[in-house]
Amino acid sequence: MTLAIDGGTPVRTAPWPAWPPPMDHAQRALVTAVLDSGQWGATQGGQACADLVAAFARRSGVEHGVAVGNATLGLFAALRGLGVGPGDEVIVPAYTFVATATAVLLAGATPVIVDVDATDLHLSPPQVEAALTPRTAAIVPVHLAGSPADMDPLNALAARRGLAVVEDAAQAHGAAYRDRPVGGLGDAGVYSFQSSKAMTAGEGGLIVCRDGEVHEAVWSLCNVGRALDGAWYGHPRAGWNLRLTEIQAALLLPWLDRLDDEIDRRNTFAAAVERDLPEDRVSVVPQPPGTTRDSRHLLMLRVHVPFDRPFLLAAMAAEGVPLDGGYPPLGTMPALTEAGARPEPCPSAEAAARDVLWVRQPMLMDDLTGAAHIAEALAKVLAGAARGPRP
C-alpha cells in the first residue's frame, strides 16, 4: 500500500474536532452577564471567580483555592506559599512540560530533575528517594496526560522526610486516584486553563489547598501581599498581582457541568484505539497504579519497533492523522541546566523521548471512526517505514 507521503491515498481527509469547542449556552449567558455588569476584574465585586474557586476546591476534596493567571504562576505561588525559596531543592519529573521546572526557578529554588517510571512515565518514588538531599524541600508530581501519578508512596516519602507536595494537575481536570480527586492529594494542587487543556479560557490557572494558613499565604502572594480581610493598601508581605479575571472564570465555571461527559468520551475513544492497535508494534502507555479515573488529556503511544521518528511523524500527518512527538527530557535543556537545575540520570525519560508519541486531546473528542483511522494509519505507516525513510 502506497503511503500518502509517497503519493498514495491518505487514510483520513476529514478534519479533526476543533479545540476549544464553541461556547455553549450556559457559557455564553454567563460571559454576557459578566460583560454587561462591568465587573470584569476579580477585585470589583463579581462572583464568577469566587464561584469557580469554590467549585474546584469542592471537586478536589479540599476547602480552599485561589484563581490565578496561569498554572506556571500557580506552581510558583503554591511553592512560595509552602515556604519554598532560595537555597531549597524541589524534585520534578524529567518527562513533563518545561514550566514544571521553570516555576521552581521562579520561586528561587533549584529544580532537581528525576527520572520517571519506565512503564507509566510518571515520577518514580525510588528515583525521588535516591535524589533527596538535606536541601530538598518539596516534590512536584505531575499527573501526566491526565493520568494520576501514584501518590501514596510519594506522599509517604514526603511525610517521612518533612517535604511539601505540590501536584501539577495542569492536564488532569477530573482525574482520580484510588477514588480520590487529584489536586487535593498533596499540600497543594495546580490546574491549568491554557488553550490546549480540558477546560480553557485561553489562559488561566487555579490552586487548591487544604490548610487554611497555606491558603492565606498563597492568596496573599497572588494579591499583591494583602492579607485576607486586611486593608486595601495594607501589604504585610511581598506579593504580586497574579489574579484570574471574571471573564475567564465565566468561560470556565459552566464547563464543569460537562467535564465528566467529555472525559467519558475521551476514555471511550482511547479504549477503541487500544483495541485496534497492532500491539506487537504499538501499545498505549499504561496508567499508573491506583488510577481510578484517567481524564485522558493525551493518549500516549509507545512504538516497539525501530523507526525513524521525523519520518513517521511526517508520514502520519500526510495520512491525515497528525501525532505529537512529546517532550524532550528536561535534563537535556541547556536553558534549565544553565539556570542551575540539577539533572539526575534519566534513562526512562530519554527512552520516552525516542519511543513515545501522543494523540492530542482534540482528536480524542472525535467519534470512533477517528479511533479506527489512528490505528489504521499507524499500521500502514509502520509497515511502510520498515522499508526505511524515502530519499
Image (tube, helix red, strand yellow):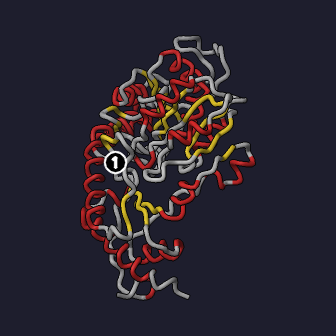
Task: Please tell me how crowded label 1 is: few (under 14), some (14-19), or many (20+) other residues with Cα within 10 Å.
Answer: few
Residue 240: quarter of image: top right
Q: Which residue is mark 1?
A: 23
Q: Quadrant of the N terminus?
A: bottom left
**Residue 312 can be seen in this image:** yes
Q: Residue at x 34, y 45 (%)?
A: 294
Q: Position of residue 131 (x, y in %)?
A: 62, 39
Residue 280: quarter of image: bottom left
Q: Position of residue 89 (x, y in %)?
A: 66, 33
Q: Position of residue 37 (x, y in %)?
A: 41, 30
Q: Nearer the viewer, residue 110 or 158?
A: 158
Q: Is residue 106 above or below residue 23?
A: above
Q: Residue at x 34, y 30 (%)?
A: 59
Q: Is residue 66 above or below residue 334?
A: above
Q: Position of residue 276 (x, y in %)?
A: 27, 67
Q: Residue furthest top?
A: 230
- Please state if 277 lies on the left or on the right of 335 as rendered: left
